[in-house]
Image: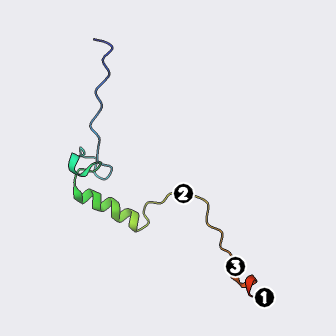
Amino acid sequence: MADDPKPRPLPRCPICRRPAQAASRPFCSPHCAQVDLGRWLTGSYAIPGEPDAIQDNDEDDT
């Protein structure tokens, strides 16, 4: 049949590109999940945004 949708490709691990496993999805293994977590914790990944405005508290001391 021509109307059959194409089968979805298997999801890939975002770290090593191997096929993802159900137990540690979207990663292929707990190791790749830990690598990803480490990248977030060290600041390798960042969500872009406006820098926070720093308020000067010295003005309130008058």
Q: What is the crowding at mark 2: few (fewer than 14 residues within 10 Å), some, or many (at least 20)?
A: few
Q: Which mark is residue 62?
A: 1
Q: Is residue 38 above or below residue 60?
A: above
Residue at the (31%, 24%) spot, across then down: 6
Element at label 2: loop
- The C terminus lies in which quarter of the figure? bottom right
Q: What is the crowding at mark 3: few (fewer than 14 residues within 10 Å), some, or many (at least 20)?
A: few
Residue 5 percent coordinates (x, y): 32, 21
**Kind of residue at disc 2:** Pro
The span from disc 3 to disc 2 (Cα, nearest Å) is 24 Å
Residue at the (23%, 58%) spot, across then down: 30
Q: Earlier in the sequence, mark 3 or mark 2?
A: 2
Question: Seen from this angle, which residue lies furthest right?
Answer: 62
Residue 4 percent coordinates (x, y): 30, 17
**Kind of residue at disc 3:** Asp
Q: Which mark is residue 48?
A: 2
The span from disc 1 to disc 2 (Cα, nearest Å) is 37 Å
